[in-house]
Each structure stands twice: as structure tokens, then as C-alpha cells.
Amino acid sequence: MRRRSGELESEVLAALWAADGAMTPAQVQAELGGSLAYTTVVTILSRLHEKGVAARERQGRAYAYSPVQDEPGIVAGRMRKLLDAEPDRRTVLARFVTDLGEEDEVLLRQLLADSDG
Amino acid sequence: MDDGALVPMLAPMLAWLLVWCRSWPPRPTSWLIAGISVLLAVSSTATLAVTAVNSLLSGSVALGVGLAALFVAATGSAAVAGWHRRLAWRIPVDGLAILPDDKPLAYALPGGVVVSRGMVRALHADQRRALLAHERAHVSLRHHRFVLFVDLASAAQPLLWPLRAVVRYTVERWADEVAATATGDRVLTARAVATAALAARHSQLSVAALGVSAGPVPQRVAALLTPVRPRYRFLALLALLVAAFVAAEAVEAVLDLWSLLQTP
């Protein structure tokens, strides 16, 4: 499947954030399920480094990359604290998932179990 | 002018009719709800203004002033609703911003996507791809405008209030469908939504309200797992007809007032 470079950058950046420590391109490639070529991963990682959203250090023959907290993330974090004080915050942000009720959780676990088969 | 009284009665009927259509295909339904909300709000606000002027002209000052106050309240609360979200929309996000927060959070802003560290850690790589595709769909399809228009409309015409939740649900479903197409896997997308919701729930320390009936998230997951194509054309047509009637009534009221003002 073809994906645009911005989408790939987002995926790689999210993978860096999901990891506990710095990641080599090979580790990033493995984390993403091997769907990307090694050279592609290297290119994306160095682009993220140029943008200043990933730091890198030598680790043997390759670089190891770790995420850097960038300005928009910091602003979004600050804004979230502001919005938390707003009674309206749930209506302002289109959130991926809304809060679950007790029955919702049971129902969701059932749906997940059913989709396993 | 008597016909104008039908407008406020028809608006809530239509709103409740549209509450039923949340399970329709999300893209046309989002358009239908946003379009009808705006049409109804503009029509009923115009009718209100016209009726207020008419009453003042015909000498019933108390009624006229009362209606004029309602008109000011309607336009004023719409303006407040619009002003309110400027705060969130000013966050300068371009593409993806990661929030240094271990609570699983993800949302779309007009400029881009905000995801928390807690959320990327709660999902597998494939599920993250579904999540990012979902949030990108919100951004590129400008879903915030659909929500904004319905919010503005329901601020002006409070009887449209139930549609606020409906349009929020249909744009989420719409983005779910885009993510399912982008990843090519409905089950994966469903699992991403469910996993994110469960992770978010378990990060909350407070005990959630008990006894709530099935909320939007299980409905979205179920819709992804078992896509149904209900028949809906008749109801959609009916809703459009009622909305057109309401709009025609409003236009007629404005024209009546206009000709009244023209005659010396």
C-alpha cells in the first residue's frame, strides 16, 4: 500500500515515542512490522532529525534515534491543562474515543473477543 | 404569520427524526445533519426577528420586545459558541504533535493531529496506523466545521440540541470508515478504537458513571465489525422536505414584512 511521506513520518515518530529508549533504524523497521524498506526508514529518521523532532547518537555503526519534545507538543500540553479547566472541553475537541460507561467496557471486551475468531 | 408558528414546532420534530439516522452511512448523514441544522437555525432566527418587528409595528410592544430579546439571545449564544473554541484551534499543530502525557489521548485540530505518549504506547504499530489515519481524516475532511456549524445552529435554536451529539458521532464514524479504507482492514480499525477506549478508561482514576447504556464507542466498533447498509433514502428525503418547508416559511415571512414596510 502506498502512503505519503507525511504519513510515514508520523508513523515513525509515533514508533519512537512508543519505545522506551533510543531506537536504531532496524529496530524501528521491526516495530513497524517490516512493511517499510530499511533505506526508507533511514531516510525518514534523518528527516525527523533535521526537523528537530528526533535526537540521534552513534550506536556502533548506525545512529540510534530518540524523540524530542517539540514546540507544538509543549503548546498542546499547556493548552490541554487550560482546556481541562473548561466545562466545555469535551465539546471543543474531537477526541478519538470518548469516555466509557461500565456496560460499554463489557460490550467492548465482548466485541474484541468475537472479532478474534 | 400564523404559518410561521409551525417553524418552531417542526424544528424539534426534525431534530428527533435525525437522531434516528446516526447509523446511516456517515458521510451523507454528516452533510445532511449539518445542512439541515444551519437551515433550521437561520430560518427560525429570521422568523423570530420578523415576528418581533411585526408585533412592534402592530402595537403589541410587550410581545415584540420579548421576541426581540429571544432573537438577541439566539444570535448572542451562537456567537459565544463560536468564540469559545478559538482557544483550542490556535494550537499551532502541523502534521503530528506528541503530547508529553501518559494518559491515552488523541484528537484532531484544524491544523493537525495531537496524540499523547500514553496513546502511542497503548497501541500496536498497526493500530497506531489506524489511529493516525482516523485523525488525519478529521483534519483533511474538515470535520471540525461540521461540528462547529451544528453547535452554532443549536446555540441559536436550542431545540436542535440533540443533534450536537449525533453529528459528533457521525464524523467519528466517517473517520473510522476512512481509516478502515486506508488500512484495508476493518477488524484492525475496530480493534484500534476499542483498545484506545479501554486504555483511556483504565487510566482514569475516578469511577465512571454506572448504568450508562451503550455509548458511542461500542456502537462504532460494532459498525466497523458488521457493516450494515440500511435503507434510508425515504427518511432522508422526508427530512429534506420538512427543512425546505421551514425555509420557505421563513422566506415568506421575511418577504411579507418587506412588502408591509414598503407600503406607506
Image: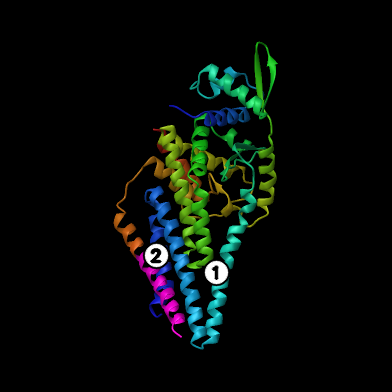
- The amino acid at mark 1 is Ala
Disc 1 is placed on an element classified as: helix
Residue B172, given in percent of the width and then of the height, sits at 47, 47
- Quadrant containing the N terminus of chain B is bottom left
Local packing at callout 2 (Cα closer than 10 Å; few below 14, some 14-19, many 20+) is many
Q: Nearer the viewer, residue B231 or A52?
A: A52
Chain letter of the residue carrying label 1: B
Q: Give, as a single range, the part of the protein colored magenta.
A: B242-264
Identify the residue at horizontal 50%, vertical 57% (top origin). B149
Q: Which numbered disc, 1 or 2, marks the residue that appears first in the sequence?
A: 2
Give the CA separation, mark 1 to mark 2.
19 Å
- Taking the view exactly as shown, the residue that stands out farthest to the top is A61
Q: Which quarter of the picture shows residue B75? A: bottom right
- The amino acid at mark 2 is Leu
Is the image coloured rainbow, by chain, by secondary structure, or in one colour? rainbow
Chain letter of the residue carrying label 2: B
Q: Which residue is under mark 1?
A: B74
* B252 is within the stretch colored magenta: yes
Indicate which label's residue lies in the foreground, 1 or 2. 1
Q: Which residue is under mark 2?
A: B14
Mainly helix, strand or loop, the magenta region? Answer: helix
Q: Nearer the viewer, residue B193 or B233?
A: B233
Residue B119, given in percent of the width and then of the height, sits at 59, 37
Disc 2 is placed on an element classified as: helix
User: In the rendered picture of this protein, how many numbered marks are placed on residues?
Assistant: 2
Residue B249, given in percent of the width and then of the height, sits at 39, 72
* B113 is within the stretch colored magenta: no
